């Protein structure tokens, strides 16, 4: 059986109420930082998913009213008729590629902040805002509920006018009023909208019925519902009230889009949920109690698992947010029996971090994500080479691999030289740490691609000097030699580093990932990077049985991971493994057998016993080769470019993007690059 035949079940059309999806691939609603501020970029990004074979392409949250203002985050808006043209741009772009367009209507209740509109916050009961901003939501009275239902009905009508094929009622992620009404921790009402489950589900039922009345037979109605809060007996559980909700509403929507709450659980990282399809056990009951089609998620990347879920009658649609970001062409690659070419999601949540920051989406695996309109980048198409014939890439970390792959795709003869015994650089090193094994997919995808190409030569154990680079005779050189972690304590909190006494046992992340481990404890992991790696290293050392003391100037462990929805899990994991936490402490000095800490607030010092210190502070760019090449007189090189961490240390996603950008810009006019950094969507000025 060929791959195409094996997965043919995934390409069957499926009817959703009055509309039909051409296959079973369904891009569920997900945020992208484009929204109402960047509608052309939003349309282009969604269109790319449709072009890649996703039969249904959904928007992100669409705010239905000024009382659900998510500013500064740029979601979609459908407040009034002025929003229809921008939404029509999205539906037209999706329809042109042959897919159905879905809109997720949302009123976020006390999850919203209303910073722009300054409107009162609404909730089922008196509730404090779910963010640090000191504000409270008022309990909605009957008039408020009637108004909310009118707003939702009007938004449904505008959705139909904007050309959407599927209209969502959204009751999930702890983010929306329908979900807040469903959950006792948010709803202590004593009227017909509170108390019993039948009462708490009343608002969702009314929204489904009224949305159906409003859009008639033109649009399908979807219900996005979190069947389990993953709080055990403290919350809604799939086999108890979660199942009961589905039973009560079983035939009302045309489609069930089911997942778990909250968002940090639904979009769990591979660090804490390594399994593809990790939500299956929570959602597998749904098709047992409804005849309507069901879409589910769980970072589904394996075509075998996808086909199995359909054949077993668990899902009708393969839902995806993050896998569709990592590879918008995943469905087409399965259909065309090109499975080895899929860029698998690594579950790092860099896409999520963009939304958390209120900036356009990005992806570690797919550097073109979010750049479809503003840079005219296509994930599968790149312009052919111009005049030059050959290029040398030195270093095979994420930047070097991406640069080499894209140069090869453009048609250049590419030589990739790696000083170490294996390709991959920091990706291979970090992927060996506890919880990060899926990150190896970054190198696997690129190395496989390069190995298939006849215009690529790959060399390991090939440390090059400047003279050797010149001897190779290739006039275009890209240097991706990475960066090393400092050993002197210099970082965010100490520009001049920390005093380190003679005989102190000092290690860096480079030592740990290379297998050079402290032998005795306790080990101090000092995290002044405050991103993810310090927490990972502490977890890794504790996992292999070391006694670990975690020290950081931050007030929590790994504050960056709040952006990736992991921080609580990171800190919990360390505590459960017995790691001692010293928060809000800088490293004032190290001597044999002890480390001196200083409170960031009071300046008071205290000493703790330790056998060694792992410094996770700041990286030094490795530019020796680049500097030597720059210093050559009468250099024959036409191109010499520093990329990745060697140019600007950052995330793996930043390094991949740097390598991709270098390959795209190669042989472009420098003035054009400066002038066309990227296209901006300029807000038009309306007359008063």
Image: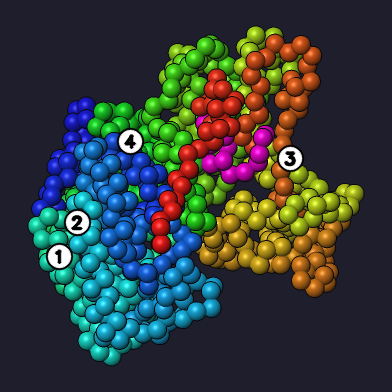
Earlier residue among tags 4 and 2: 2
Mark carried by residue 214: 1
Q: Quadrant of residue 126?
A: bottom left
Discs 1, 2 touching: Cβ within 8 Å: yes
View extreme (front): residue: 687
Q: Is residue 506 left or right of residue 249?
A: right
Circle 4 sits in a helix, a strand or a loop, which is it? loop
Q: Quadrant of residue 267?
A: bottom left
Towards the viewer: 5 or 17: 17
Residue 299 falls within the magenta-colored stretch = no
The image shows residue 185, relative to residue 539, as above or below, that is below
| Label 3 sits on residue | 620
Foreground tag (4 vs 2): 2
Dominant SS in magenta: helix
Q: What residue range appears in magenta?
A: 646-660
Measuring from the top left, give residue 359's x and y in whole percent: 50, 52
Q: Residue at x 20, y 62 (%)?
A: 157
Q: Earlier in the sequence, mark 1 or mark 3?
A: 1
- Residue 160 has which mark? 2
Disc on the earlier residue, 1 or 2: 2
Q: Which secondary structure lies at badge 3? A: strand
Work out how far the residue at label 3 is from the one at label 2, CA to CA, in angstroms: 55 Å
């Amino acid at each position: 059986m060929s791959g195409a035949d094996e997965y043919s079940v995934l390409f069957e059309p499926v009817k959703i109420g009055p509309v039909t999806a051409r296959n079973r691939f369904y891009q569920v609603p997900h945020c992208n930082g484009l929204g109402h501020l960047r509608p052309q970029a939003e349309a282009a990004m969604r269109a790319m998913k449709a072009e890649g074979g996703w039969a249904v392409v959904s928007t992100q949250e669409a705010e239905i009213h000024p009382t659900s203002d998510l500013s500064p985050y740029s979601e979609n808006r459908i407040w009034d008729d002025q929003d229809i043209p921008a939404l029509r741009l999205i539906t037209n772009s999706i329809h042109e590629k042959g897919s159905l367009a879905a809109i997720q209507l949302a009123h976020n209740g006390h999850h919203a902040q209303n910073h722009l509109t300054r409107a009162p916050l609404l909730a089922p009961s008196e509730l404090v805002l779910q963010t640090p901003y000191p504000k409270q939501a008022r309990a909605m009275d009957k008039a408020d509920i009637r108004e909310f239902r009118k707003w939702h009905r009007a938004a449904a009508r505008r959705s139909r006018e904007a050309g959407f094929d599927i209209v969502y009622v959204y009751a999930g992620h702890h983010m929306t009023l329908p979900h807040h009404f469903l959950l006792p921790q948010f709803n202590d009402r004593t009227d017909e909208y509170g108390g019993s489950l039948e009462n708490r589900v009343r608002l969702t039922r009314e929204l489904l019925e009224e949305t159906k009345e409003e859009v008639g037979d033109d649009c399908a109605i979807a219900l996005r519902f979190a069947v389990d809060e993953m709080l055990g007996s403290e919350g809604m559980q799939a086999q108890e009230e979660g199942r009961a909700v589905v039973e009560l509403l079983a035939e009302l929507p045309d489609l069930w889009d089911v997942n778990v709450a909250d968002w940090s659980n639904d979009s769990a990282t591979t660090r804490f949920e390594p399994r593809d399809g990790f939500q299956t056990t929570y959602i597998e009951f749904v098709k047992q109690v409804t005849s309507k089609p069901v879409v589910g998620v769980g970072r589904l990347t394996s075509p075998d698992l996808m086909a199995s879920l359909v054949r077993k009658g668990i899902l009708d649609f393969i839902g995806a947010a993050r896998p569709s970001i990592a590879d918008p062409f995943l469905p087409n690659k399965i259909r065309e029996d090109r499975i080895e070419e899929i860029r698998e999601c690594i579950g790092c949540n860099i896409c999520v971090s963009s939304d958390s920051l209120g900036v356009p989406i990005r992806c570690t695996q797919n550097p073109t994500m979010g750049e479809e309109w503003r840079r005219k980048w296509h994930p599968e198409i790149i312009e052919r080479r111009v005049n030059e014939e050959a290029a040398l890439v030195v270093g095979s970390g994420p930047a070097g691999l991406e640069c080499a792959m894209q140069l090869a795709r453009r048609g250049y003869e590419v030589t990739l030289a790696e000083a170490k015994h294996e390709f991959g650089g920091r990706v291979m090193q970090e992927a060996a740490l506890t919880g990060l094994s899926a990150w190896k997919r970054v190198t696997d995808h690129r190395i496989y691609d390069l190995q298939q190409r006849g215009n690529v030569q790959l060399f390991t154990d090939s440390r090059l000097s400047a003279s050797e680079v010149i001897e190779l005779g290739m006039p275009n050189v890209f240097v991706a030699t990475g960066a090393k972690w400092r050993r002197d304590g210099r970082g965010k909190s100490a520009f001049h580093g920390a005093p380190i006494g003679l005989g102190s046992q000092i290690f860096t992340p480079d030592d740990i990932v290379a297998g050079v481990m402290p032998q005795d404890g306790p080990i101090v992991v000092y995290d002044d990077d405050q991103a993810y790696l310090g927490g990972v290293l502490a977890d890794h050392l504790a996992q292999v049985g070391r006694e670990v003391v975690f020290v950081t100037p931050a007030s929590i462990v790994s504050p960056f991971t709040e952006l990736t929805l992991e921080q609580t899990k990171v800190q919990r994991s360390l505590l459960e493994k017995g790691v001692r936490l010293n928060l809000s402490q800088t490293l004032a000095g190290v001597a044999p057998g002890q480390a001196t800490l200083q409170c960031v607030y009071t300046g008071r010092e205290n000493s703790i016993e330790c056998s060694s210190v792992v410094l996770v502070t700041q990286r030094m760019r490795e530019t020796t080769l680049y500097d030597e090449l720059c210093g050559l007189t009468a250099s024959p090189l036409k191109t010499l470019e520093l990329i990745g961490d060697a140019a600007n240390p950052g995330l793996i996603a930043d390094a991949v993007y740097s390598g991709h950008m270098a390959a795209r810009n190669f042989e472009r006019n420098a003035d054009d690059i400066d002038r066309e950094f990227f296209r901006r969507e300029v807000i038009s000025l309306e007359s008063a």
